[in-house]
Amino acid sequence: MIKVLFVCLGNICRSPMAEFIFKDMVKKKGLSKAISVSSAATSSSTIGMDIHEEAKIKLTENEIPYNKHKAKKLLKQDYQKYNYIIGMDNSNIENIMHIVKEDPNNKVYKLLDFTDEKGEVADPWYTGNFTKAYNDIEKGCKELLKSIIENYNL
Ligand code: 4NP
């Protein structure tokens, strides 16, 4: 099983959108038995919270199914559990490294590094722009899935 963990600051806006968008893409490719997907926060302040209402609206508009969600925090031991630990912005990467300490197996990535444009998924909690966040996440997830399919010959 290839295990993918999306990470953002609060685990209520960007990383849960990424989790459910990516799950939907994986399912549509018939790869749900090969790839598992989850999400986590680097901050403790939102632990237990559900997906932000505006993120739910974006998922619904795009016909992406989602489950009841409880924000959880990234743990040091998650480094061993996952093959891909994917942050949304530079600050997420710094915070991930603070928690996991080192990345000897090159598992830590920034989502948009899989796209030609690179860059960061801006935090809609601060920008208010959930549409831009959704579109950037969708683009990143599409390229991430291509990369996993190639790397693992799926
Ligand atoms: P996210 O957005 O990292 O995309 O989930 C945030 C959600 C909540 C907070 C910050 C960012 N917060 O400070 O509560």
Image (tube, rainbow, N blue to C red):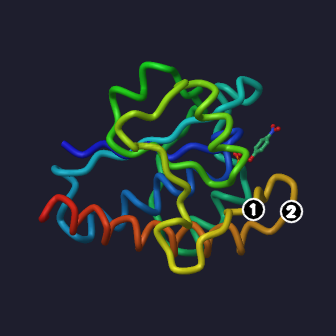
Query: What residue type is disc 1 on?
Result: Ala
Q: Are marks 1 and 2 in contact (CB under 8 Å)?
A: yes
Residue at (17% x, 65% y) in the render: 30
113, 16: nearer the viewer: 113
Residue at (41% x, 29% y) in the render: 79
Q: Name the residue under label 2.
A: 127
Q: Relative to 34, does residue 63 appear above or below in the rendering? A: below
Query: What residue type is disc 2 on?
Result: Thr
Q: How crowded is mark 2: few (under 14 residues within 10 Å), some or many (20 or more)?
A: few
Q: Relative to 86, does residue 73 appear above or below in the rendering? A: above
Tell us which disc is closer to us: 1 or 2: 1
Ligand 1 rendered quadrant? top right
121, 63: nearer the viewer: 121
Residue 22 in the image: state x and y as whole percent: 41, 60
Image-based side of 92 in relation to 4, left or right: right
Q: Name the residue under label 1.
A: 122
Residue at (45% x, 60% y) in the render: 65
Q: Relative to 121, does residue 49 appear above or below in the rendering? A: above
Image-based side of 127 in relation to 14, left or right: right
Q: Is mark 1 within 8 Å of ligand 1?
A: no
